[in-house]
Amino acid sequence: MPIECSIFFTDMLKSNGGTFKIIGPWFASSDFVLTAHPMNINNVFCKNHVNYVKGPELRQILEPYEGIIISDSDVWKRQKKVLMSFFKYNKKSAAYMDRILLQVLKGSLFPVLDHFQTLGTEVNLEDVLGRFNYDYMCLLGFGFNPKTLSAELPVVEITEALGHIDEALVHRRVVPQMIWKLQKWLQIGKEKKLNRGLKMVDDFSYKHISSIRDELRRSKAMADDRFDALTAFMVEEEASYVSEMGKSDKFLRDVVYDFLTVGKDSTTAGLTCFLWLVSTHPWVETQILEEIKANCPESNDGKVVYFTPEELNKFVYLRAAFCETLRLYPSVPLDFRSSIAPDVLPSGDRIGPNTRILISLYSMGRSEEIWGEDCMEFRPERWISEVGDFVPKPASMYLPFGVRQRACLGKELSLKMMNTVAINVLRHYEVKVVEDQKVAMTNKVLALTTQHGLKNGGSQRWESSSPDRHPYLPFGVGQRASLGKELSLKMINTVAINVLRHYEVRVVEDQKVAMTNKVLALTTQHGLKVRINKRKIGSPQ
């Protein structure tokens, strides 16, 4: 669904008190109630949540995602219990998740950013972060690293297949059901691409499921240093429902889909929007850098820094900036529900049975009634108290990770990963958004993303404690370092101090200052014309 729909919905909701009904053509079955009213949202997700389900229509549209994303009632409860057995904290799982995150950071993300910084070329930051998340999710979900994040940025067939699937499912959501069902029957258009993409993803999924099963048969147990999701489910024996589902290839295939879609896309979108907003708001970047400096070890020689969840709580401004990012650009801008029985919303609107409800998280984040007149501004300070503490908002007005029964199971893992990546990227690199590009947002079927990527021309930050990470060699290095370095620096500094102390140097306007190479040095092409005024020593400047 184009982001223009969310913008249109936002304007309509502002004019109609936060809730209104849309009546579409009779043949299109497109009637629904749209709301961004906090009390209505609390009613749908919390107070009367048993009356609002994903519904059969959404399950038909999103049939490839047959996992926890679109399931309801008892099936959803069983799947949730199984997935919670993986996401629950224990030392083994925590150690594995920490290790693979550091592995992809140090082994892939930093080398690729260094490569493009050295070349001085632009790079699509969303593509880089998407590849980073894909490699991380493959390690987390299936225990292998496809290494799609490399300097060559290779074509990845499986991610292209996922893109075709996503396009087809978005198409299903915006056209009448009869049209996409006819295309599916005839195997034409986007439905044909959907079918091909599903086959490729299924082949990918079952190949890795079979490989892990074979490995477990040979070893009889899971390796001590491994805790990926597929392996954990296959050996889980805590309860009968876990064991039964863990032995089902169909359930495990759905797990693969969940990791490769929702897990990857939502964190990629969140990180991309965060770095975009921070880089275009210099005072926010300055605050975050000061916080990073205050909380990072001084002598880590440019290495990746890593924090426990408790230590990350010290990064109050960083947390506020992430919350502000997800307020303006929630990873899931629209959520869908269908009523089972009649209901009356707190706003007074009557809901009939089998009525579709659209909850606009995008519009709620831009509501003046909730956030004030500056609701369109990126201002992390709204999340911080006068004494500098983080101030959380009620779930009914801020729910980028869902709420209560349908809250995202991977929320804490996602936040930890995004914070760790943000701290290390901002600490080592200066992200500069390329000027004059149009950064437009669009909806994937399950996540918000940029429409054409985010071009970045980054540079490294200088840190005196880490010369190896930040090469700087105007006087050469090692065996070939300049013998006259100290003498030259002393002379240059002495001349500069005395000239600037006694004289005011003004460059003549409208002259072209161009640089050229001599055989052994860089110099100006036509000199540098200036006007000199003598300073009065001790006078205020």
Image (cartoon, rainbow, N blue to C red):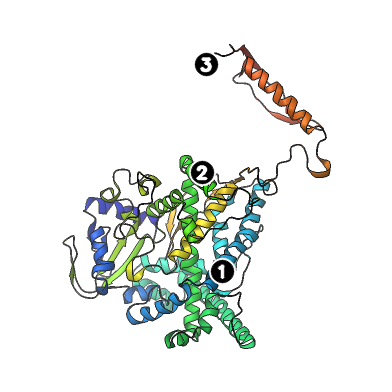
The 10 Å Cα crowd at callout 3, few under 14, some 14 to 19, many 20 or more, is: few
Give x and y (percent) for residue 146.
62, 69
* Secondary element at tag 1: helix
Circles 1 and 3, Cβ within 8 Å, touching? The answer is: no
Of residues 298 and 44, the one drawn nearer to the viewer in this rendering: 298
> How far separated are the C-alphas under marks 1 and 3?
59 Å
Marked residue nearer the N-terminal end (1 or 2): 1
Marked residue nearer the N-terminal end (2 or 3): 2
Give the residue pinned by disc 1.
Answer: 95
Of residues 129 and 167, the one drawn nearer to the viewer in this rendering: 129
Residue found at x 75% / y 25% = 491
Q: Amino acid at mark 1?
A: Ala
Q: Amino acid at mark 3?
A: Pro
Marked residue nearer the N-terminal end (1 or 3): 1
Q: Is the residue 211 above or below the residue 431 in the image?
A: below
Q: How many marks?
A: 3
Give x and y (percent) for residue 76.
37, 78
Q: Is the residue 121 above or below the residue 326 in the image?
A: above
The N terminus: image quadrant: bottom left
* Secondary element at tag 2: helix
> How far separated are the C-alphas under marks 1 and 2?
29 Å
* Residue 137 visible, this orientation: yes
The label on residue 540 is 3
Q: Is the residue 151 above or below the residue 95 in the image?
A: above
Give x and y (percent) for residue 124.
56, 53
The label on residue 390 is none
* Residue 438 visible, this orientation: no
Give the residue pinned by disc 2.
Answer: 290
Left or right for 455, reference 526: left
Left or right for 105, reference 62: right
* Secondary element at tag 3: loop
